[in-house]
Amino acid sequence: MTHKEIETIHKEICNSILSKHLKMAFDKLTLLASLLQIGEWMDKKEELETTYKYMLQYVTEGVSDPEQTKIYNQLRFSTIELADRIKDLLMTKDSANYVYAQKRIQKQNRFPVEKEIMAEMTTYNENMSMASLIEESMNKKDQIQNFSVEHEKMQAVLFNHFWLTDKYSAEDMELLKLIFTSEEIQFADKCIIVSAITISLMRDFDENKFNILLDVYNDNDEQVSQRALAGFILCSYWHNSRMKLYTKLMQRVELFVQQQGITDNIRIIIIQFIKSMETEKITKKIKEEFIPEIAKISPLLQDKIKLDDLMKDENSLFDKNPDWQDLFDKSGVTDKVQEFAELQQSGADVYMSTFSSMKSYPFFYDMCNWFIPFYNHSTVVNFFNENKKSPILQVFMNSQFLCNSDKYSLLFSLMQMPQQYKDMMMQSINVESEQLEEIQNNRELTTPSKKRELISNQYIQDIYRFFKLHPRKSDFVDPFHTQLNLHNLSFFNELVDHEKILRTIGENYFKQDHYEESAKIFEQLLKTDTSNIELYQKIGYSYQRLGDYKKAISFYEKAETLKTDNLWNLRKIAFCYRSIKETELALIYYQRAEKMAPEDLSIQLAIGHCFLEQKRYNDALQVFFKIEYLKPGNEKVWRPIAWCSFVEGKFDQAEKYYNKIDDKNLHDWLNLGHVELCKQKRNNAIECYKKSFSLMNKDVKKFLDIYNEDIPTLVKNGIKEDDIPILLDKVQYEQENEADI
């Protein structure tokens, strides 16, 4: 049986247990247990099933047992735990999956005893401090390097152990307690272990792992506590249904979410996860819009800037040339840069595209290094020693907008640069370091809430990169592959009574165009705020963007009853009615809007289109001429004026307006051909048809399909129906003749 088949059966067992279909679960479990070919596991399954059959018998006979619920829940708990164990044994045995291949390697390696681990980890800082007191020498550098390397080996050992262990033993829990309560162990070590617990818990449910994350949230270091909370929320969502089986755990969670300040922290992390859903869209936007826009301008800038001249006067680097700005403004680059900056400030992941190709360094071969904070790692220390006069390390350390793995990627890229380019970059960073420091000290960025937000944002970006960029990513279940509706967590139900939190989450979904989610949240808020006009409008808009115009109308109209004659609301209702071809109703609302904003030409244009769709061509013409009068040269009305004039037999007028259009499309040429045909200028008509035919890439079927729609109008305006096929054949013959020449 394949890895995927085992995973599928295990999932089916869990779902059956959670939905209280134990017979189905036992049948599937029998299949899995038989694959082990070890009687012990089948015996355990049989023991549980026998207990369940006795229970069924008692229930059938009407025997009252006060312990029935307790026994039943214990059966469900024990069965799902047994399924976990059997699945793990089967997978570890021969699965090619990266995780289980690593588990087999792990079994062959000796795990240090508790005393060894604590001794190495607690003495690391002391050793580094002692080494720093030594006078500058090769020996000093070697000592520091050796201490760092040995410590990093222990980090990897601990990470792998806690990542690969499915169920934590009493010994594991004791070791973790010692690590997280020790003041001598640095924050980076704790951060790495928290990440290992999180990744492990994503794979296999373990009550102990949840308890550790809850414990660690109270750590004094915010980097550690925010990681623990982010991991807890993500894993709670992943195991939302299963958690309900664990009474003690749920009781603890209920107490946990009552802590002071926890609601704001949960809100921050949930919003950061919501923002991560936009990463792929932002990456695509950067590749398709930002970079091409900047690339377009670069040849012009080369001439404008004259790099050789610039380098003659260093001070010129700080002067802004008006010609450049003008060039940027004309190109649209300024707008793109501004948009990029706004995305960055909002916490969006704008660097994924930049660093996605920079995760192939050997550093990332170790799993733990995907989650390690940017601190005095041996690589960092070495780079710093080589570039003592540069503030680059401090810049890296303090950067609020780069996640940890991206900082390491950038550092490795710098290390591989030729020295001349490295020096240029160092010079640039030196120049900008004071400005960067000023930004970092910005009051808004140094508030406790903002600090927590930045920490969690960086960490969630690290998690995102791991699941999206790890070479064996297909062997991990990617939590970002599906919609992360974290506000639906069972433990969060008590918190969502706080309107502010739920409203913030809804607004974030709304801003990021996740309208299905925003509609659901706003509708939930309506239950306690039935007179909130803005909520009705935003729900209506959400459904409008989803294409559910009837539902959108129902909410827009509710907003209208609460406050009549809201211009925005009237236009939205009109638009939705027009979208479902209810033009009579659309006109009613557009005309109400017109009274409120008679000078708004877009409303006039919409009214004209409604008349056009109703085939009230003279009424439409009156509106379109009014628009042209109010705004001469408005090209938007030329096409509808020309078409309505043609349909009404006003051929000179139609010809005039079609000829005003400079950039004619295939429909313009076709319609002008109709006009010329009705004016008995058949040769002119054929020339127009030929141009339309060419713009359709000489697709005969497409040309005829479009043309046939207009035949009734042509016949109405005096064209013999029998002449039309002949004329169309003439068009095709002439096109072929021209192609042969």
Image: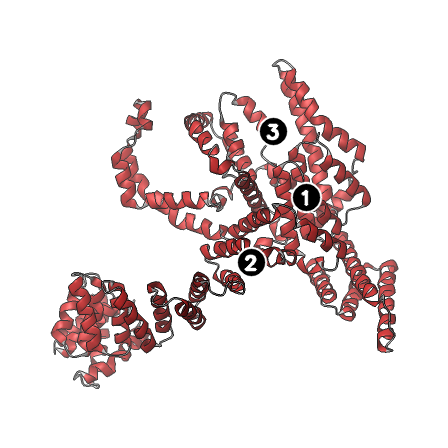
The residue pinned by badge 3 equals 376
Picture quadrant where residue 547 is located: bottom left
Crowd rating for badge 2 (residues with CA inside 10 Å; few <14, some 14–19, many 20+): few
**Residue 438 % position (x, y):** 44, 30
Image coordinates of residue 618 in percent, x first then y, are 19, 77
Q: Nearer the viewer, residue 115 or 415?
A: 115
* Residue at 22% over, 70% down: 640
The disc placed on residue 483 is 2
Who comes first in sequence, dot 3 or dot 2?
3
Mark 2 element type: loop
Q: Position of residue 474 (x, y in %)?
A: 61, 53
Residue 740 seen from this side: no
Residue drawn where x is 29% and y is 37% of the image: 301
| Whole-number angstrom distance, CA of label 1 to CA of label 2 | 23 Å
Q: Earlier in the sequence, mark 3 or mark 1?
A: 1
Task: Residue 440: give x, y in percent of width and height.
Answer: 48, 33
Q: Horizontally, is 416 left or right of 362 in the view?
A: left
In the rendered image, is residue 31 in sight? yes
Q: Nearer the viewer, residue 333 or 55?
A: 55
Residue 196 is tagged as 1
- Marks 3 and 1, how far apart at CA: 20 Å
Query: Amino acid type of disc 1?
Result: Ala
Q: Amino acid at mark 2?
A: Gln
Q: Which mark is residue 64?
A: none
Taking the view exactly as shown, the residue that stands out farthest to the top is 135
Q: How dense is the environment of label 1, judged by Cα within 10 Å: few (below 14), some, or many (20 and up)?
A: many
The residues bearing labels 3 and 2 have C-alpha atoms spaced at a distance of 36 Å
Marks 3 and 1: CB-CB under 8 Å? Answer: no
Element marked by disc 3: loop
- Compared to 229, does 586 lie above or below? below
Mark 3 in CB contact with mark 2 (< 8 angstroms): no
SS under mark 1 = helix
